[in-house]
Structures are given as C-alpha cells and as structure tokens.
Image (tube, grey):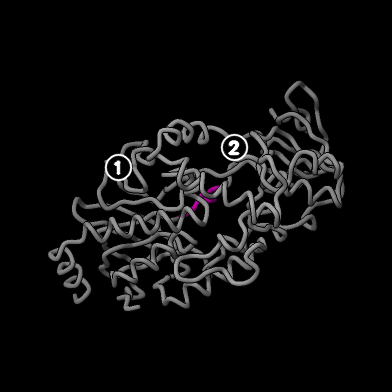
Amino acid sequence: MNTTPATDTGGAVDTVIVGAGQSGLALGYYLAQQQRSFVILDAGTRVGDAWRSRWDSLRLFTPAKYDGLPGRPFPGDPLAFPTKDEQADYLEDYASRFHLPVRPNTAVTRLSHDGQRFHVTAGTQRWTAANVVLATGACQLPKTPGFAAELPSDVVQLHSHNYKSPAQLQPGPVLVVGVGNSGAEIALETSRTHETWLAGKPSAEIPFRHGRTAARFFLPVVRFAGLHVLNTNTPVGRKMLPRMAATATPLIRTKLADLEAAGVHLVPRVTGVRDGEVMLDGGQGLPVANVIWCTGFTEAYPWLGIPALPANWREQQHRGIVDALPGLYLLGKDLIFAAASETLPGVCRDAKYLAKRLAATRTPEHAAAVQSGLAA
C-alpha cells in the first residue's frame, strides 16, 4: 500500500489519527487503500500497549472470529477468546504488516483549528491536517470517588487500570468497588487468594453462559443486534441507545452466581469513608486492607484547544462526524452510532464508513494543497 508518511518531526498531511488502537488501525487500513497522506499518533511505546497494560488474566469477551481487523482475520481457533496480550500482539503485527504510519511515543499535547486547518502538536513535533480523528478509546483517565483520599495510608488502593494480579495486594480483606465486568472478573480472581467483598449492583446479566457454545450460537445474534438493530438509524435503536448510555454494561462472563459460589461477599454500594472504614449504603462500616476501584474512566481531552466547540460536542455528532466542526471525527467510542460501536466488529464497520466520508469530501484542490504542503 502506497501511503505517504509524515516526517518524524511532523508535516502537512490529509488526516491525523490520534490513537493506534484497533479503531485507529482499522481506519488507517482504509485510508492507506485510498493512498491518503495520514499519520497515526500514539502515546504508547508499542502498538497494543493499551491492551498489555490491563490485568494479567484478562481475556476478550468476543471470540477470535470477531476480533480481527479489515484485511486480516484473527489467527487461531475462531471460537477461542484471546488473551489481552494475544490481542496486543495481533494489533502490533497488523500495523507492521500493512505498513501503517504509526508514530509511537507521541502523546498529543494540543489540538487547535485556525478556521481552515487543524494543528496537532506533540512535544516538539507539529502536524497540520484537514481532518483529525479522535480514536483514543474509552479507557483514558481512571475515575475514583473523592473520598478515596480519606482512607488510611496503610490501605492498598488500586484502580482497575493499574491492577495486574493479586500479587499487588497485601494480606487482609479486599473490597472491589463497582459491579461491572471488570469488577466481577477481578473480584472472582482475588477471591482465590483473599477474602473479597464486591460493592454495588450490576445493571443486568446476559441470559446465557459465556463460552464456546455461546460463541457458536448466541453471540452471533448479539452481534447482529448490536450492529444492525440497536443503532441511530432504527426507531428501536434511537429509543434504546439513550437508555443504554445511562446504565452499565450487563455482566457477560462472570455472573453473580459465580461470585457467590466462589465465596465473594456481595454488599451494597460504597457511600464514603468514616473513621478509617469504608461505609456502605445502609450505614455498615467495612474495615479493609485493600481496595480496588472498578469505577470506570472519564473521557477527557485536556489538549483540545478549540474553544468554539460546544460543551456537548460529543453528543452533537452522527456516526462519528462532529457537526460543530467539519473535519473532526470520533471513532471507537461507546454508542456513537450503535450499541456495538466500541467493540471490534463495530469499530471496523464505523471505520469503513468514516473512510468513505473522508474520500467523498476530498476535492482535487484540497489534494493539491496537501501535496504542496508535503513538498514544502
């Protein structure tokens, strides 16, 4: 594929993609097919580091047959659920195989717009572009409640983003806060070595057991609904997506019955800290030696220097196209078009759509301007 790379110090390109995860790489594949000039900027040292940084035992919820990117199926058993390191290595190989212009160790520090073009700064490097795609993923800034700082200093506190294995924990009880999929899976793991409490209540549970049978018979139905039924183009999707945005993802692999069978103590949500103890809804105090906050992430772009954008600009978009500023796009974000927009199948579908839109908006005059900028 004949992609014109940017220089190591920056340059003028047609499109800057921020983030070299699965969404950024999928879009890069399509842009390379169009012979567009583009660059993919990523803060990580290696492609796939966002996966490598998660806890050691993590496996994907989708089977391998759904975990590939355009042009290259995921290798191996199609009904297996890859480990997070297998997924990371696949992404790294994908970027290399298709010669995608990824710039690692390149954290964006400012994005601005002068009325005609975007200016992207990463340290001493600078790019100008007609289009910028924010493909940074959902796991950006770990979120913990303010009262976490009130816990005694001898309590080990980790966010799920920093948790790797029970080896990080000290002897004594563990409180896992948050009953999403991360909280459920981590609590099940810590229960094998520590007495474990899990605080909160899940939004729901999928009504079948996760595994190879589900990968063969049930997950294809879920995938179809998440892509083609629950999206903003259908009446049921327009009705359901706002409700889904207000609730947590249902438990997929580890259910409440699994946790209870493993001896995990299920307790109400955490409300604060008093006298060195975690307080639960209802007034019960819980002395703990370790707390793992599975309380999600905050989406933030502190480097976004475009004051003209409205505060709710993320909501003012359709299929990743930001209405308020032509040329700015979102990819790989939860529910931006469909229930499956953040999953690998959804990412590939949305990346293909954005690539077509980018191709449609590229005029000969603009292409000439880009080439002039590159030549300069």
**Viewer-proximal residue among 191 and 236:** 236
Q: Main secondary structure of the magenta part?
A: loop
Q: Which residues are magenta?
A: 136-141
In which quadrant is the C terminus drawn? bottom left
The residue at the far left in this view is 365
Label 2: state its secondary structure: loop
Instruction: Look at 70% across and 33% down and name the residue there.
Output: 200
Picture quadrant of residue 372: bottom left
Query: Can you see residue 297?
Result: yes
Q: Position of residue 171 (x, y in %)?
A: 87, 50
Q: Is residue 372 above or below residue 305?
A: below
Taking the magenta stretch, the answer to whether it contains residue 113 is no
Which residue was labeled with disc 2?
A: 248
Q: Which mark is residue 307?
A: 1
Q: Residues within 10 Å of mark 2 (few under 14, many from 20)?
A: some
Q: Is residue 204 above or below residue 110?
A: above
Instruction: Look at 65% across and 68% down and name the residue there.
Output: 77
The residue at the far top in this view is 282
Q: Position of residue 207 (x, y in %)?
A: 68, 40
Give the CA separation, mark 1 to mark 2: 31 Å
